[in-house]
Amino acid sequence: MEIFLLNTLNGLSWGMLLFLIAVGLTTVFGVLGVLNFAHGSLFMLGAYLCMQTMQFFDSFWLGLLIGPLCAVVVGLLIEKYLLKKVYDRDVSYQLLLTFAVLLILDDAVRMIWGSGYHVVEPPEILSGIVAIAGQDYPVYRLFLILIGPVIGGLLWAFFHYTKWGKIIRAASFDNIMAEGVGINVPLIYTSVFALGTWLAAVGGALAAPQQSLIPSMGEKIIIESFIVVVVGGMGSFPGAFVGALLLGLLESFGTVFAGRMQMAIPYILLAVILLVKPNGLFRKGV
Amino acid sequence: MKLLRNRWFGPAVLTVLLLLAPLLISTYSTMILSEILIMGLMAISFNLLLGYTGLLSFGQGAFFGLGGYCAALMLQAGYQNLFLLLLVGMLISLLAALVVGFFSVRLDEIFFAMITLGFGMLFFSVAHNWLDVTGGSDGLPVFVLPSLNLFGTELTFYDPLNMYYLVFSIVLVGVVLLWLIVHSPFGLILKAMRENKQRVSFVGGNVQLLRIVAFAISGAFTGLAGVLFCLFNSMATPEFMHWSFSAKPVIMSIIGGTGVFLGPLFGAGIFFLLEQVIILFTENWMLFLGIVLVPIVIFFPQGVFGTLRNKIFREGAK
């Protein structure tokens, strides 16, 4: 029973992080039609920029605020100077271009901060442990379980109740029609990419106190985010939520029932979903 | 110009150059050239899917690795026959590709890329974790290379020069076979499916089956490249099956040009040349690879070789 509870909590906290990253990826795909290979690198960049900000100001909260904003600037440059040129090109070119961005970002971070590990301390208020089921459990993970739905809820409200959110949904539904009724679609694309970058970077900043920072930390998470996005349904907001939690829990419980083959679980999930429900669990729609 | 536009001129010159190259370049360069040829074979087999059938496979590493592991396991078990190694490696990869293909080909575009990536990583997970058979992350070393009895002379492949000619011959056979496939009626149907699979279906083509066959052929030749690489490298490691390895033939094909049969081979050459040049002055070769890839993707829609070739042909036609 204790093991069940602890695994559930672990799965949820990892799932919430995955959700933040995957929701950015799925929104960018839903609107721009580009599956961004470099999304994981933006996650990694967010973590590093958060760490750097903390070295300047010695506050995790400032790091969480400023780090992702700096990452957004990088995201804007990527969209404006690179991605824009390949919107009407074949999928393989888009994947390769964003893959090139991944290579550049990963190596650039390696050059700036070195290839060794970096550690980020959680803020004092969240650094403690609580007793759950007779075990010490880090408060920070509980915080992650809470912050995920908060950001997710705000995003959902943004998409459904604000004018901008509705415009973005319109553009993702039919960008030609949206342009026809006077919506500045290129501007929407840029903003959505910035939003996606911000979400990835916030995910990175939030992940920073939980795992050590290395330049390759984005490479593992990008594949898992791909899986979440495909499982949930490409472009689907609720799909990203359900997919992320499902994957998080499966991986967490996988350590119990699958042992060493736990590593294969995400790929089995991906293959099964693609074969049974090729459109993912939820159909398209932001 | 007329000679240049003859379809046999380019390949003939290339073959002669590759035959003579080891006599003119250093041993180190010869080894690089062997690697280019092996990866070139992998990239051309991959391009049978991307360039000819319109399927972006992101899991080719699985078949490359299967070929490699097959060779390593057989050598460890004492099977020394070179042709047996090549044949079994190809067959196992073919069977695996049939299974993966059976499930994957019903999907298109990005979904196809994702499911092949998933299957590839599934193979990677097995190779990485099945310690007893695959040696886990350390990989499987090869201690004894097979030898070949050629007209009474026993050839061994510890010498890089012999290894090069082995690689060269096998790759040449593989590429010629692939060329024949691409230019057969079957190859034409593949191109038709790339353009419009509904129409192929309307005129009675079994799209699923044709795609599975294409996927299996591609997997088999990728496995062949994997066997060669295992011999060349004296090692099979799980890295062969990782998605980042599967990305290599994608990069090479797009650099070289997916619309030209030999484009991916040129892409492989450019890829390794870039690597060699870049590591001369910096360790961060990925960064520079990325920086080089960006303009290639943006400004060379048919790949470097494809775009240049189109230029030559068009100007020649004026």
Image (cartoon, rainbow, N blue to C red):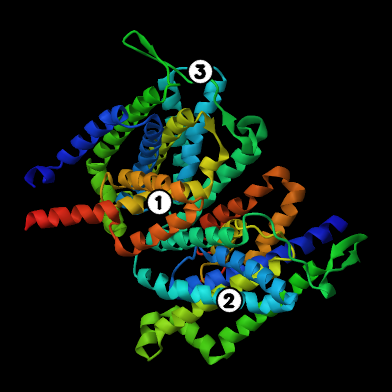
Q: Position of residue B50 (x, y in %)?
A: 35, 51
Residue at 65%, 48% (x, y): give it: A263
Name the chain letter of the residue that bears numbered label 3: B
Marks 2, 3: nearer the viewer: 2
Q: Which circle marks residue B250 in the picture?
A: 1
The CA distance from mark 2 to mark 3 is: 58 Å
| Residue designated by label 2 | A70
- The amino acid type of the residue labelled 3 equals Tyr
Residue visible at 36% across and 71% down?
A85
Amino acid carrying mark 2 in the image = Cys
SS assignment at label 2: helix
| Residue found at the very far right of the displayed protein | A134
The reply to whether the C-beta atoms of the residues labelled 2 and 3 are less than 8 Å apart is no
Where residue A195 sits: x, y (%)? 55, 78
Specify few, some or many for label 2: CA neighbours under 10 Å numbering under 14, 14-19, or 20 or more. Answer: some
> Does A281 sit left or right of B37 as displayed?
right
Q: Is residue B144 left or right of residue B289?
A: right
User: Residue at 83% across / 73% down in the picture?
Assistant: A124
Could one spot residue A215 in this view of the protein?
Answer: yes
Cα–Cα span, label 3 and label 1:
33 Å
Look at the numbered disc 1 and give the secondary structure of its residue: helix
The answer to which of B147 and A154 lies nearer the viewer is B147
**Residue B269 at what x, y percent from top left?**
34, 44
Left/right of residue B193 with respect to residue A211 in the rendered view:
left
* Residue farthest front in this picture: B281
Q: Which residue does the numbered mark 3 point to in the structure image?
A: B79
Tell me the quarter of the image containing the N terminus of chain A.
bottom right
Judging from the image, mark 2 belongs to the subunit labelled A
Instruction: State the image quarter where residue B151 is shown.
Output: top left
Q: Position of residue B164 (x, y in %)?
A: 37, 28
Give the amino acid at mark 1.
Val
Which sits earlier in the primary sequence, circle 3 or circle 1? 3
